[in-house]
Image (spheres, helix red, strand yellow):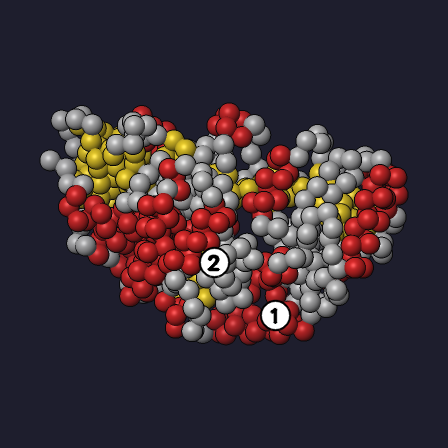
Amino acid sequence: MTDHWDRTVDVLVAGSGAAGLAAAITAAAAELDVLVVESTARWGGTTSISGGGLWMPANPLMLRDGVPDSAEEALRYMDEVIAETGPASSPERRRAYVDTAPEVVAFLGRKGVRWRRSPDYPDYYPDRPGGKVGRAIEAAPFNTKLLGDFYASARSKESGIPVPLMTDDVWLLSRAWSTPSGFVRGARFVFRTLGQFAAGKRPAGVGGALASSLMHVVRSQQTPVWLSAPVTDLITEDGAVVGAVVDKDGRKQNVRARRAVVLAAGGFANNAEWRRKHHGIPGYSSAPEGDQGTAIEAGVRAGGALALMDDAWWGASLLNPDGKAMFLVSERSFPFSIIVDANGERFTNESASYIDVGHAMLEHDVAGPMWMVSDVRHTRRYLNSALVGQTKKWMKAGLLIQAPSLQTLAEGMGVEPARFRAAVERFNGFARTGVDEDFGRGRTVYDNYYGDPRVKPNPNLGPLEKGPFRAVRVYPGDLGTKGGLLTDEHARVLREDGTVIPGLYAAGNTTASVMGRTYPGPGSTIGPAVVFGYRAARHAAAGQASMP
């Protein structure tokens, strides 16, 4: 406890990604005095550089379009794919999530967020009971000029997508020059982009659009946002959190929070010490540099329990010559490619959900490098933005190998040529029959989403026959960590004994995920971040977290 307060608010929000901004908007809408603090010099968090999708079952846009869905169907699906993973994904939290998703979409829509559906994007296990196509939504491209000079400090300005790109575009743009549907979407995207710039707009797409849309609401509510202002500790009184220590401009400030402190400051993806401790690897993450686990650590010091610390939002990634991780989604799923281990053999369904591919990479018991191998048709037909104009740089770093034959490619990869050749020939046989007898690649509509419909009989299988061939090194990367503070259905932080820490809430990657160890559908990170940020602020606003 402290006798000195530098500032007093009703709700203090740590973090400026989707979870934190949703909490701030909700609290301000309840006429509470809110302060948002961001640990880095740029606002928007991991949300800004993400695909920007939200997995929102039974959302109003689905109902508007006549697509049937319900909370019960979503719960059945979650129960099927998540199974039992402990209190982080308790029945109460799952129910709270599916019940609140439509409500928060409507609420933020009323506040000015322009939502769009991704009607063709399937759940990641669409063949399981309750699985659907089209539950994902995203923010429409946003004109960042509406944020004025404040946009200069946006993370998306530095590393986002400065064009009106939407998640619903990506699957088709990746094959814009190889399929008619891709070409048509590419043409529409070009005209949309030209139209935005001709109208004098400064568009942001995907995650940048979502973060900017939310921040525009926050700014319109006149909520202050402090940058370069990390929460370094929580202040407690009689077991309740009553405020936080914020390091602003090099000066420690004690900020009192009459109703709540909401921790929404990301996970620990770039904390190498924690990554080695909990994951056994240094981490190859696409998350921003501020993902250091400081909010989680502060919550633990206040008595918070932890869960799922050994897991992350995994996925195969490239590591460019500068050391930056680049997440693979469509590239590994398109035909004429496979992923092999250090023996030159396949070990997973390359078109599966990225978290399943990531888990397979981590659990595979063959030590050594892994490679995504492709023939020239993959190179010519499908977009791999990481390698465009950069092949010499990648080859010099030993991360990319090109060879005229599979024999010489195997030698460059350091794998036994005969074993590699046998693995490729086996896969080529599956490509001709259309059935992957080893791993079931191309079996579901999710697999097919990032496939090529021109390739028959299976849009995800194409034989590796035509050189030159490529092999690019792949790593078990991630979009962020999945473990953190344990919370209840109101986003209240829990102690080890299951009791609530009064005044302390958390959402987003600061918490152990309601999705457990899997990834049910597109936007399963940001969807819960927004829902539980909203629920935290709503609970605090109801007065149930009021501090003396």
Residue at image position (21%, 45%) is 540
Residue at image position (26%, 54%) is 26
Query: What is the quadrant of the C terminus in the image?
Result: top left
For residue 430, above or below residue 175: above
Q: Residues within 10 Å of mark 1 (few under 14, many from 20)?
A: many
Instruction: Give whichever of discs 1 and 2 has the lower sequence position.
Output: 2
Which labelled disc corresponds to residue 130? 2
Calculate the distance from the C-alpha at mark 1 to the C-alpha at mark 2. Answer: 33 Å
Q: Which quadrant would residue 504 be assigned to in this image?
A: top left
For residue 18, above or below residue 410: below
Question: What is the secondary structure assignment of the residue under circle 1?
Answer: helix
Question: How many numbered badges does the structure rendering display?
Answer: 2
The one of 530 and 448 positioned closer to us in this rendering: 448
Amino acid residing under circle 2: Gly
Amino acid residing under circle 1: Gly
Which labelled disc corresponds to residue 186? 1
Are the residues flagged by discs 1 and 2 in contact, CB closer than 8 Å?
A: no
